[in-house]
Image (tube, grey):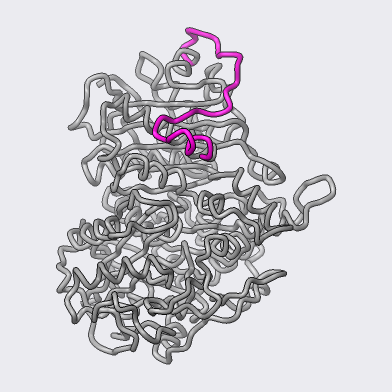
Amino acid sequence: MRKLAITAYSLCSAAGDGQVATLRALRERRSGLQRNDFGAAPLATWIGRVAGLEEQALPPQLAQWDCRNNRLAWRGLLADDFNDAVAAARERYGSARVAVIVGTSTSSIGASEDAYRRLEPDGRYPADLRRPIIHTPHSLGDFVQHALGLCGLSVTLATACSSSAKVFAQAERLIRIGIADAAVVGGVDTLCGSVLFGFNSLELVSPDPCRPFDVERRGINLGEAAGFALLEREGPAAAWLLGYGESSDAHHMSTPHPEGRGARLALQAALERAQLAPGDIDYINLHGTASQKNDEVEARLLAELFPERTFASSTKGWTGHALGAAGIVEAGISLLALEHGVLPGTLNSQTLDPVCGPQIRRDNEERSTRNALSFSFGFGGSNCVLAFGGAV
Amino acid sequence: MSVQLPEVMAEGVAFWASRLPGWDVARAVIRGEQAAPEATMSRPAPALLGPTERRRAPDTVAVALEVAARACAAAGRSPRELPAVFASTHGDLQISDYMCATLVDTPALISPIKFHNSVHNAAAGYWSIGTSSHAPYTAISAFHHTFGAGLLEAAVQIACEQQPVLYVAFDVEAKGALSTMAPSRGLVGVALVLAPASAARPGSRRLTMRIADEPCGATPPLSAAAALVADNALAPCMPLLEALAADLPATLQLTLGERTVLNIQVSEV
């Protein structure tokens, strides 16, 4: 593949709204996690909740897409003037030539959950939620396309926690074949009952702030987030998409392959496309959910394949696990590392699991960074690794 | 905008619907060679799953694995080597109904298996596990344009990587209150093994595809078979299946968006 220019990107999570706020939270090691207060009977856990979504208004012409997930999507589009960058691309290429490929795990299922709580006596949805578009997975892709005034291809990709990493791969292929000149990629997931109680049923939710790679880690904290990136063949690049790798574990629906078989294949494919070797990688944003299995498998893989100087960390202690939006938020953090040389450590973790090699760091560092990887591994054994390069 | 895609070959076709259980039956009904069976089958029994797994599998997984395996068999390709594109308009509507209903009264009693089966890529995940395939898969939705968007993604992957791709699309019957917002009846699954023109196998059909800005929209389905699945969310797949069932070359359009279509010519190799 030919590398693609990332000419704009945005991110909005519990750690911060926009690049500046996120960078500050990373530097100051300020976590966005809080005690769970989501819903009527909140579970005893911690969450990464984005403030103010309850009051977030959408422009009147976008009212039919109104729901928590699309409100957060709107925040992500406004952050870092991302929508202005897309408007300029729309002028350059035409509205049919800018594709929208966005990832999510649960899209706006929260709106369906709300409807079930308020069903009318005849079993119908309450009048304010009788909008079919917000009760289907493509709610997100359809909203983003309309919000940006685009009319080309719009697809929602949903492979659980790898969703908004895989969007880079799908978009790169579309641009390579000439179906689009540019693509808006990204992802959005919001807190909802399905994921809080669902992950709780799998006994994967931590009662404490999550501690990725810590020997005493007790599970994940769920988070919500939005993020976007604009991909073009050429342009004033903040950074470059150098490669991607995708694979399947072929092992289990909700636990990773014990030897990280799929993760390894995705990593190899990403390095091959980017024409990089492990020794060329300065920073890796790990999946690092703080679940027992994920962190163990990932740590072993790192220790085996990367030199000591590679700086690797999980940033879920800042954001929580934003599921289908984790890929794009962590891609955004990797781009911040490339642009500003801020390498975030692993927040909340005290004593790293002995399985961790020297690559996995607790403390932040500031150093010039040329190449970064971002790992995203999901339910159903879906893996994606992204490779990014700095502007120069 | 008009973009011509590199040609792809349809090497294997599979189909399953409640009144049309299998491509041979569906093809014969489309061609007017036989009437549709009166009996309605509830769901297929995919050979890839053991008896217990088969009983427990959601309808989405059962229908997707059934058509995926049959398309690979028809193409004579090993499933393990094929990257796969899975597409579904609404995903597992029955599990979504279960999740929403359970959350109202007894959220702490959510079934962990139902939860991990609720992801849009559950069928894709079970397929990769069942076939021991480490090849990448994806799982997408594009509302009314889902079938066309999935076919396009499969064609794009073939053009980029020059290797065959399995395309699987399915939609299931909606349940509960969600059925008023995401209506879909019956169970429909379609799978195609598609290959680059350079790797064409005898008996393949050639698909020449072009993306165009044309507001005229989708080709309407014509067959008696299409009428049997008209109320399933995957009904837009039928014009392509009608073209694949016919002896003569045919041209049709699937929608990719409000103003964008995928124009497809189906012809002999």
Where residue A372 sits, quadrant-wise, is bottom left
**Number of dots carrying numbers:** 0
Q: As rendered, which of A200 and B25 lies closer to the eye?
A: A200
Q: Is residue B216 above or below residue B97?
A: above
Task: Indicate the position of residue B6 as horizontal and vertical percent values.
Answer: 26, 37
Q: Is residue B105 left or right of residue B76?
A: right
Q: Is residue A29 above or below residue A115?
A: below
Is residue B30 visible in the rendered structure shown here?
yes
Is residue A83 visible in the rendered structure shown here?
no
The residues colored magenta run: B30-57
Q: Main secondary structure of the magenta part?
A: loop
Task: Indicate the position of residue A288 as horizontal and vertical percent values.
Answer: 38, 71
Task: Indicate the position of residue A351 as horizontal and vertical percent values.
Answer: 36, 85
Where residue A38 sits, quadrant-wise, is bottom right
Quarter of the image with the C terminus of chain A is: bottom left
Q: Is residue A329 magenta?
A: no
Q: Is residue B240 left or right of residue A259?
A: right
Q: As rendered, which of A44 and B39 lies closer to the eye?
A: A44
Q: Is residue B54 magenta?
A: yes
Please name the residue shown 51% across and 82% down the image: A32
Please name the residue shown 34% across and 82% down the image: A352
Q: As rendered, which of A373 and B70 lies closer to the eye?
A: B70
Q: As rendered, which of A107 and A78 lies closer to the eye?
A: A107
Q: Is residue A249 above or below residue A188?
A: above
Please name the residue shown 33% across and 39% down the image: B131
Task: Indicate the position of residue A225 as horizontal and vertical percent values.
Answer: 50, 70
Q: Is residue A382 above or below residue B63?
A: below
Quarter of the image with the N terminus of chain A is: bottom left
